[in-house]
Amino acid sequence: MKRKCHRRINLSIAFSTIAMVSFILAPSVLSDSKTWTALGPYGGFVSALGVDPSNPKTIYAAADGMGIFKSTDGGGHWKKTGLAAPTVFFAIKFQPGNSQAVYTASAQGFHISDDGGKTWRLSNSGMKATYLLAGAVDPVTPNNIYVGAWGGLSKSTDGGRTWADASSGIGQKSVQALAINPLTPSILYAATWEAGIYKSTNSGGSWLQASTGIKDVHIRDLIMARPNILYAATDSAGVFKTVDGGKSWTSVSNGLGGLSCFRLLVDPGRPDTICLGTQGRGIFMSVDGGSSWQEISTDLPPFCTPYALSINSRDNIVYAGLFRSGVYKSQGAAAKWVESNFGLTGHSVSSLIVSAKPRKLFAGIQTYGPSVFVSSSGGTAWTMSNSGMNYPPVFSLVMDPTNSKILYSGNSGSIFKSTDGGENWLPADTGLARGYRSTYALALNRANPKTLYAGTDSGVWKTTNSAATWKRAGLNNKTIPALAIHKTNPDIVFCGTASEGVFKTADGGRSWLRVSSGLPNGAAIQTLLIDPAVPQLIYAGTGSSGVFKSTNGGNSWQAANIGMTTLSVSSLLVIRGTPTSLLAGTNKGVFRSVDGGAKWQSVGRSLPVDSVIYALAYESAKKRVYAGGNTGVFWISWP
């Protein structure tokens, strides 16, 4: 199945957080000696898994859009490796006899680590197609590596350093899976999406059709149980088996009904034991070579789809990588599944909202799948909240200040609304082109919450009836990552663009004036904050030049970024106290200024070094600052 990575990670804006648009009293400045505490939510869209054959307690998991994670205790704890690429991953492989050599196939190409995941390099030289879907390593000659892609096959004979085309007979078909004969590695099999299965007997030099008997040419996965015994998972016709090396195939789908088969796993120590991941129906197992199947989805999330399956055959532990729910593991065929996600920060948080009554913390998720998480315990436990939200990447969240049950979500493809505190969502995008309009920023008129503005990939939109209908409000064909509404005059709205600085309207969006004097040329504005006590004072977070400040309502701007002159700033928060503190979420963690942005210092300790903070929020009752980004949600006490 073809999958595209369609997230916009760098455009995710957290301006809509309630705590970011008002001053909040706090008695003093945060001490740099304090430590950030990780809250999760853990999990993510895990699309590839690899158990180290030499040390099965070591496992690698690929979280789409986030990177590769590693566990050395059988999935008890995870840490991100040196590969933190915003891409789609499809396979994790090891070099036989050298578990420090790890390979991944991704939408970016072929990644190699020679040190157990600490460092990685992209190696695509000579590769015919680089959107990789599958991989196989020769067990006898480990320098021989094969990769399948959208557009055929490539082969390396030098451990992945260089590549040559190996598509003769397959052409530009999409190769979904590869299987290699461990006793005679010159024999390989390739599963395609368009034309069934192909076989090569000369190390990929040429390929011939080997699909006789298969009723569906759309092959999702292919595994080898014994040298001549293989299983193929099809899109609509179940599972097929060959016992003669691909000459003929027979259906082995008894008990599967009409399920769409998605992923296959064979236990190398028990080759008649096969696990099957299905589309939306969890996992099935056969212990008799496919003659019968039994569902083994107890305690898996409902309607789950396993995108990855892997096994520690020595300890009989099966691992499943799920869409949006991370990693689960099960020991033995009769055992229940348990979540195994601690430390696996596969969700990127775009936005945060703190609700006082009832106490709730909302986290919008910009990686594909969960949409929104809600916590009633300050982040110690999370519940997925995406019922009805069918365009899942969330870029912005806002809450009605007069009714905490009403929330709005700006997504990839739509705007959604909840009237029950986030438990259920409905599209609220009449007037917008559903499925084609990404909303990166939402701003709500606090004096009249029925009026909202939406910053999209095609200008500004406005509603005056609580998102029942939307109309264009200017700046058509511009991408708008940031919005801010004047507190006492809601007809005054500022918007930050992706490449043209700041614009201002004083008539509710009927006309706009560019107000970018003093900003860098082509400035990407990622967040805006109007001082509610001094509306002429405005702060703008830029994509690569830190913070800029206007003291005259946007007529002119000056840099306010000493200590962060080259940083990307995606969120801003003001906490009033003695002195007042301005916080900035950046691509290097959280910074604060106590002099209106003249100077900045890093806040707290123990944020992961690769943290990009897209959202900031303050909970006054608990005196906590929350930071959300590509490493999940963290909190620190304030002061």
Image: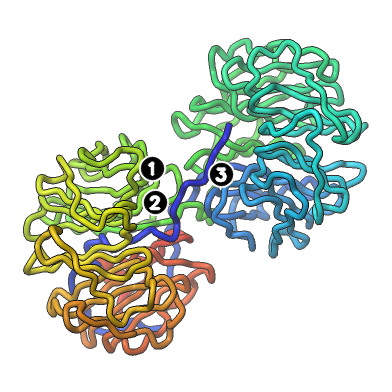
Judge depth for marks 3 and 1 and give the one in front.
Answer: 1
Residue 46, disc = 3
Residue 525, disc = none
Relative vertical location of residue 550 with respect to residue 3 in this rendering, above or below = below
Relative vertical location of residue 379 with respect to residue 211 in this rendering, above or below = below
Mark 1 and mark 2 in contact (Cβ < 8 Å)?
yes
Query: Viewed as shown, does residue 131 lie left or right of 158?
Result: left
Three-letter amino acid code at disc 1?
Pro
Label 3 to label 1: alpha-carbon separation: 16 Å
Query: Viewed as shown, does residue 235 lie left or right of 625?
Result: right
Label 2 to label 1: alpha-carbon separation: 8 Å
Q: Classify mark 3: helix, strand or loop.
A: strand
- Look at the image and tell me whether residue 342 can be seen: no
Image position, residue 501 (x, y; %): 32, 70
> What residue is drawn where x is 18% and y is 54%?
473
Query: Viewed as shown, does residue 182 lie left or right of 627?
Result: right
> What residue is drawn where x is 76% and y is 12%?
212
> What residue is drawn where x is 19% and y is 49%?
472
Image position, residue 269 (x, y; %): 80, 31
Which residue is at the front of the view, 312 or 541? 541
- Look at the image and tell me whether residue 8 can be seen: yes
Q: Quadrant of the C terminus?
A: bottom left
* Pointer 1 residue: 392
Which residue is at the front of the view, 20 or 28? 20
Three-letter amino acid code at disc 3?
Val
Residue 365, disc = 2
Q: Disc 3 or 1, which lies upstream in sequence?
A: 3
Q: Disc 2 or 1, which lies upstream in sequence?
A: 2
Which quadrant of the structure image shows residue 66? bottom right
Q: Residues within 10 Å of mark 1 (few under 14, many from 20)?
A: many
Label 3 to label 2: alpha-carbon separation: 15 Å
Image position, residue 301 (x, y; %): 46, 34
